[in-house]
Amino acid sequence: MPELVATVAPAQAGARLDAAIPALAPDVSRSYGRQLIEAGRVLLNGRPARPAQKVRAGDQVVLTIPEPAPVAAQAEPMDLRIVYEDAAVLVIDKPAGLVTHPAPGHPGGTLVNGLLAHTDQLSLHGDIRPGIVHRLDKDTSGLLVVARTDAAHAALVRQHQARTMDKEYLGLALGHPRPETGLIDAPIGRDPRERKRQAVLATGRPARTRYHVEREFAPAPGVESCALLRLQLETGRTHQIRVHMAYIGHPIVGDAVYGARTARTARALGLTRQFLHATRLAFDLPGSGARVSFESPLPADLAAALARLDSARA
């Protein structure tokens, strides 16, 4: 197993160990670094460490990186919506209902399985998540970028951490958020009472979501007041938008986990999933550095829900 030895520079002093790892080992993402720490494969000054442990200038960090394992996920031909493709990346327009990558109890039928049937060139990022830089929830549709090489994966992760990767969503929220343009800055972690959910917690990881009200809809028979929001992620926590919107009292319509009280309105609008769509994605192409931007229109089910809102107001 290859070892990587690095010394913490003054610029990283005071950072969490998992946050410092991408600067110490540019080809290792923060999430993969955390996996290595939790597996006991990272030593801080000769001792096993914790992901949240703070580092000091001059500290020595040793990473033991396991040899690449064969990819466990199996190739499954499927009709992928490929928006863009080159030797380093692919941009996919994911439909609702498609899981991004395999997980325990869900080994197949995912985007990763389809990607493996499309190409044998994907970055190695765990045995069930090759190519995956960021994911979308099963019932969230829209754009995501996939890395075909390890160098591209590292470059995209750095952009994500530096907040130069723009990810914009359209979501329908219950009620009318105030102010109409705002920032939700609230840490997110695993809900200690329900482990399959996330929650705003003082001990959670930093999470920031910007929103802007695009349109407002007055209440109508069977439908509560709603607002169409344009949302931008500054961080990428699990279920971030859904958790943040519920936290400020305006859950995403159709969200069965965090927005149960939206069920009546969702049924009236014909929604069978949460109204959340990754509509725009912009980043710098690994290698050339050229800035690219992609857009995805609302899929038919979400567009139909907005049409019902308009007809209810007429």
Image (cartoon, rainbow, N blue to C red):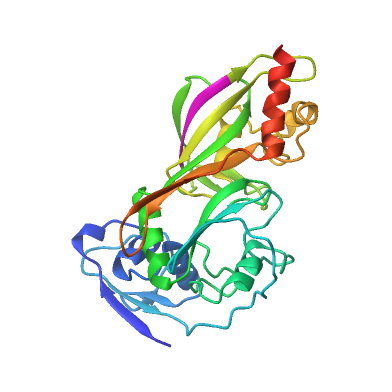
x and y percentages locating residue 189 in the rendered image: 54, 49
When the figure is inspected, residue 61 is found, relative to residue 190, above or below; the finding is below
Residue visible at 41% across and 59% down in the picture = 52
Task: Determine if residue 178 is in view.
Answer: yes
Q: Is residue 91 covered in magenta?
A: no
Where residue 185 sits, quadrant-wise, is top left
Q: Is residue 144 left or right of residue 157?
A: right
Residue 177 in the image: state x and y as whole percent.
54, 22
Indicate yes or no whether the magenta region holds residue 212. Answer: yes
* The magenta segment: 208-215
Q: Is most of the magenta stretch helix, strand or loop?
A: strand
Using the image as rendered, state which of residue 279 and residue 72 is in the foreground. Answer: 279
Q: Position of residue 222 (x, y in %)?
A: 79, 19
> Would residue 247 appear left or right of 235 to someone viewing this image?
right
Furthest toward the bottom, the residue is 1
Q: Which residue corresponds to the image point at 80% horizontal and 30% vertical from the top-left?
A: 267
Does 162 appear above or below 62? above
Q: Residue at x 37, y 48 (%)?
A: 163
Q: Could you tell me residue 56's position as x and y percent? A: 25, 63
- Foreground pick, 220 / 65: 220
Is 243 placed above or below 63 here? above
Residue at figure coordinates x 47%, y 20% from the top left:
179
Q: Which quarter of the figure is the N terminus placed in?
A: bottom left
Is 13 in front, or is 82?
82
Numbered disc total: 0
Res 176 seen here: no
Foreground residue, 224 or 311? 311
Image quadrant for the C terminus? top right
> Left or right of 55: which side holds 168?
right
